Image (cartoon, grey):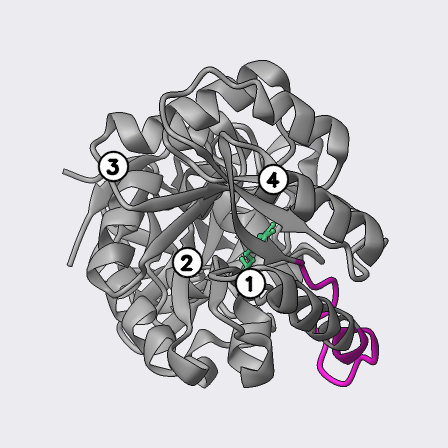
Amino acid sequence: MPERALARIRPAAVERNCARLRASLAGGAQLCAVVKADGYGHGAVRCARAAQTGGASWLAVATAAEAADLRRAGIDGRLLVMGALTSDELDMALGAAADVVAWSTDFVRALATHRGDRPAQVHVKLDTGMGRLGTDDPREARGVARRVAEAKRLRLAGVMTHFATADQLGDEHFPAQLERFGAFVADMRAEHVGLVAHAANSAATLREPASHFDMVRCGVAIYGLDPFQEDPALQDLEPALELESYVAAVRRFRPGQSAGYGRRWRPSEPTWVGVLPIGYGDGWRRGLTNNCDVLVGGSRRPLVGTVSMDNVTVDLGPETDVAVGDPAILIGTQEAERITAEDVAARLDTINYEITCGLTARVSREEGR
Ligand SMILES: Cc1ncc(COP(=O)(O)O)c(C=O)c1O
């Protein structure tokens, strides 16, 4: 039975991508698999399990609720909540036995009064140039770390930073951030033992072994998406998601007829049009109107007309043997043709992350091999 909007997820690909990343790590660094935002749209729990099987010894999420969801599903092992936390969220994160991130003494004070039954594991964040969370003052970061180390119910587990431009090859900001963090790590190691220093996202992991420190935090690459927005195959990564719909109707169009809202496409010659029951309500964005291809019957077909909430239309050409019920691949391969999340992102002037994260809950997820 065809499904109107189906994301086929292959946990085995996540497992292999993790194993491939892990094998490339310098000096025995550990792999932390980032499974926030429901595993970048792939399903956090299934991807967390696959990542662990593939050799990830840590998991990371953005929010306390994401950590609690993983624990409820029975996921164990080290888990880091990377985002900012309100006091309620802090209770939830610690209740999920997750490590948390600190960069201010106020937050450390709140942490020190937590009610949990085990010491809270804390990572101090230096902002070396992302300009988001963390303190950009290494002295302040050292002070925060000292307070954590001195507090009875806290443990200083690690130090971290995050790169702003690791995906932009040749950019000078990345080496500058790396140098700042390297100096900070050296200072911190002189004062504290057993710290896990971590900085690298997927792009940094793939391009610069010196960024690996004790652990890397890879998100996009574990899903087989290219952090450099080219082709995952160039990085030996295997996409873990395919997006499929089906042809719900095949219609003959005459010149002058139009498809969809606003009449934004009208054929100049007679042609066949296939209607696929997927739209922006599923995350197939309206900006793809007259602006992407879909694979049907082993060929690329242009999406024509306006993307609606629940339907899109594709031009099947003047003669067609496409029939109602035939599968339509929006991301993935069909015979010799392939459309990647990177291709779709380029059409929308965005990044592959936003394409898979943007697939809505209405898209059913099915595990494949
Ligand atoms: C702090 C932090 N570390 C690591 C990652 C993983 O990045 P990527 O998906 O590019 O590997 C993210 C994701 O945005 C992040 O916010």
Q: Is residue 48 left or right of residue 100?
A: left
Vertical placement of residue 308 versus 10, above or below: above
| Residue type, label 3 | Glu
Q: Pick the quarter of the image with the C terminus.
A: bottom left
Secondary structure type for disc 2: strand
Q: Picture quarter containing residue 46?
A: top left
Q: CA distance from mark 2 to mark 3?
A: 34 Å
Q: Nearer the viewer, mark 2 or mark 3?
A: 2
User: Where in the figure is residue 335, as x and y percent of width and height?
Assistant: 26, 73
Q: Pick the quarter of the image with the N terminus.
A: top left
Q: CA distance from mark 2 to mark 1?
A: 9 Å
| Residue type, label 2 | Cys
Secondary structure type for disc 1: strand
- Label 2 CB less than 8 angstroms from ligand 1: yes
Quadrant where ligand 1 appears: bottom right
Q: Is residue 83 left or right of residue 272?
A: right
Q: Nearer the viewer, mark 1 or mark 4?
A: 4
Residue at the spot of label 4: 150
Q: CA distance from mark 3 to mark 4?
A: 57 Å
Q: Say whether disc 2 or disc 1 marks the residue closer to the N-terminus.
A: 2
Q: Residue at x 67, y 73 (%)?
A: 186
Q: Nearer the viewer, mark 2 or mark 1?
A: 1
| Residue type, label 1 | His
Residue at the spot of label 2: 32
Q: Are marks 3 and 4 in contact (CB under 8 Å)?
A: no
Query: What range of the chain is rendered magenta?
Result: 161-176
User: Where in the figure is residue 309, as x and y percent of width and height?
Assistant: 54, 28
Residue at the spot of label 3: 3
Residue 265 visible? The answer is: no
Secondary structure type for disc 3: loop
Q: What's the mark number on residue 198?
A: 1
